[in-house]
Amino acid sequence: MTREEAERLLEDFDPQGDGLAAKSRELTLAMLRQTSAPFSRKQFTPGHVTCTALVFHPDEPEVLFMHHHRLKRWLLPGGHVEKSDPTLADTAAREAEEETHVRIDLSSTPRLAGIDVHGIPAKKAEPFHLHHDLIWCFRAQSAEITVTSEAPAVLWAQKDDWDRLQVAESIRNSILRVMRA
């Protein structure tokens, strides 16, 4: 994926009245246009692109969540772009598989479901920085998921669970955008 391809992808994304996604889209486009290394996890100013997997259960109206080992909150699986990832959607799928062992249904085409720019707390040699997160929609091949060192708890959650899990508004909006399509 090149910076230019990412720009086109974001330009084509319709936030459908979602102000958070629209603002994140503009911030991410600006970041892409201002830097030569938008996919490098070592670029802290103005941040870097990350990818998240919004994985739907194969049979139920549920979404895969993991309890993040460092941030101590329920999130969608995802992470940093690697040079070996052919596409940004592949980044999200790889991260979901690594973190939860979910098997992504490769017969359906992934689509960009949301964009969320958020801060990441400082740790060790990394200062506070921004993740320009692209949220990709997938369907799981099966309901099988397992805990890992990065995800000490994993679950399939319905809309009724979102308040209890304190699901972020950007994630809720992305799920609802996909469900409306």
Image (cartoon, grey):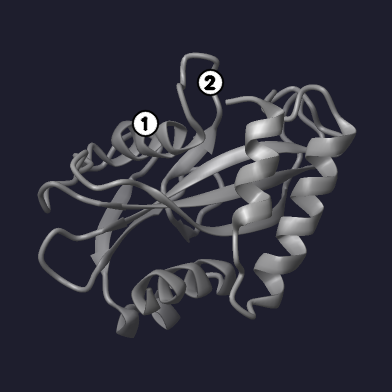
Q: Which residue is mark 1?
A: 94
Find the distance from the CA under tag 2 to the CA under tag 1: 10 Å
Q: Which residue is mark 2?
A: 82
Q: Position of residue 112 (x, y in %)?
A: 49, 53
- In the rendered structure, which amino acid carries the disc numbered 1? Arg
Q: Secondary structure at mark 1?
A: helix
Q: Quadrant of residue 61?
A: bottom left
Q: Are marks 2 and 1 in contact (CB under 8 Å)?
A: yes
Q: Position of residue 74 (x, y in %)?
A: 44, 60
- From what the image shows, is residue 15 above or below residue 148? below
Near-viewer residue (9 or 45): 9
Q: Earlier in the sequence, mark 2 or mark 1?
A: 2
Task: Tell me the residue at 64%/80% (across/down).
Answer: 17
Q: Position of residue 90 (x, y in %)?
A: 41, 32
Q: Is residue 20 visible?
A: yes
Task: Tell me the residue at 13%/46% (across/down).
Answer: 141
Near-viewer residue (107 or 141): 107
Task: Tell me the residue at 38%/73% (across/down).
Answer: 181
- From what the image shows, is residue 20 above or below residue 86? below
- In the rendered structure, which amino acid carries the disc numbered 2? Glu
Q: Quadrant of residue 67?
A: bottom left
